[in-house]
Amino acid sequence: MDVLGLRAEFPVLRTRAYLNAGTDGPLPDGAVQAAAGELEREAADGRTFAHFERRKELNGQLRVAYAGALGADPDDVALTTCTSDGMAQTIAGLALSEGDEIVTSDEEHPGLLGALGAARELRGASIREVPMPDVAAAVGPRTRLVACSHVGWMSGLLAPSELTQVDVPVLLDGAQGVGAVPVDVRALGCDAYAGAGQKWLCGPDGLGMLYVSPELSERLEVSRRGYANLQDPNSGIDARLHEDARRFDTLSLSAEAVACALSAVELLESAGWQAVHERARSLAAGLAGQLAERGREVAPRDDTTLVSFASDDAEAERELLAERGCVVRNIPGRPWLRASVGAWNDESDLDRLLSSLAT
Ligand SMILES: Cc1ncc(COP(=O)(O)O)c(C=O)c1O
């Protein structure tokens, strides 16, 4: 599939300038068919042994596809329900105690802040919030983890490259990263990378991924155990966790959601990750430039797929844009609207947004 052919696969783009993948990506038609196909099979055949084998097979395929998007070995990738799920597992698994510190940035998403709040409330850990460019320098003797976004959700800033040099584990929140910008977990120097299936990988809600390096994996406690993450689940209470990242798998995923996610990620992969990233980032850069030309202040950003820009009344303008067929979101607590630009978009979407703005 040529990257320019992607657009035709997304029904929502026939009627709207859909610029909201940072919240939830557009769903490809084929992914919807894949989900429907699984449900039809379940309805016709019932859910017996073969159904559970099918679920296992689909999970294996999705793990490989997600690993490809992360530049990781499939053995190091767990299937989760969302980005927040993977971050919560990682942070809880460190079993921190009083006096331990986590360094984070002051512009993180509730998906990470929730897990940090739990570490403080339940474990007595202290959380140090610093501006994003300072997260690496803020590491001190009590720091046990740096946890921050790979791509910031508010305006698309990248985590500082100095993070590759820190000597404590780094957890990256990749909700706005994987599928949008190049990800190579080794080059990023992170020990854990949590991502979303429903955003830039255009899957259904309820799927995500967690990369954990073999070194960190050995150190993480896994309190959540069940059929899905035990290597010998029928051994009763002595059952052991999988040796590889399947130990961090969420405990139940439906065949229909996994088939849907798999179809979506394979569609994007077929266009080539490099082409997908390049097209999305260059369209986003073009939009940022045109907004600035029209006098809209663009929030600080890097070479990513998010473009946030000033609005006098962001909620009202979001609604106005929606009425005009343009889907963007506002950022709570900031006077900004955020457009998420994907490889499936084209100039007509950007023109529609620009011509629909409140004057
Ligand atoms: C940076 C960031 N982290 C975490 C999340 C939460 O993602 P999920 O719903 O996959 O847990 C979001 C969602 O918008 C996000 O932008």
Image: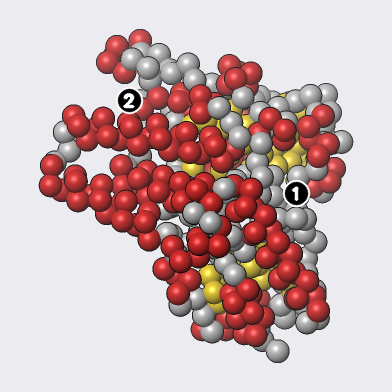
- Badge 2 or badge 1: first in the primary sequence: 1
Looking at the image, residue 61 sits to the left or right of residue 5; the answer is left
Q: Position of residue 294 (x, y in %)?
A: 78, 82
Q: Position of residue 342 (x, y in %)?
A: 59, 61
Image quadrant for the C terminus? Answer: bottom right
Badge 2 residue CB within 8 Å of ligand 1: no
At x 46%, y 46%, the residue is 266
Q: Amino acid at mark 1?
A: Leu
Badge 1 residue CB within 8 Å of ligand 1: no
At x 25%, y 47%, the residue is 38
Looking at the image, residue 343 sits to the left or right of residue 5; the answer is right
Q: Position of residue 287 (x, y in %)?
A: 71, 71
> Is 247 rendered above or below residue 194?
above
At x 35%, y 36%, the residue is 58
How far, Cα to Cα, is label 2 from label 1?
A: 37 Å
Picture mark count: 2
Q: Quadrant of residue 302?
A: bottom right
> Looking at the rendered structure, which numbered label has been put on residue 227?
2
- Residue 208 seen: yes
- Residue 79 seen: no
Q: Amino acid at mark 2?
A: Tyr
Q: Quadrant of residue 83?
A: top right
Viewer-closest of 310 and 139: 310
- Residue of label 1: 158
Viewer-closest of 304 and 225: 304
Packing grade of label 2 (10 A; few <14, some 14-19, many >=20) is some
Question: What secondary structure is marked by label 2?
Answer: helix
Contact (CB < 8 A) between labels 2 and 1? no
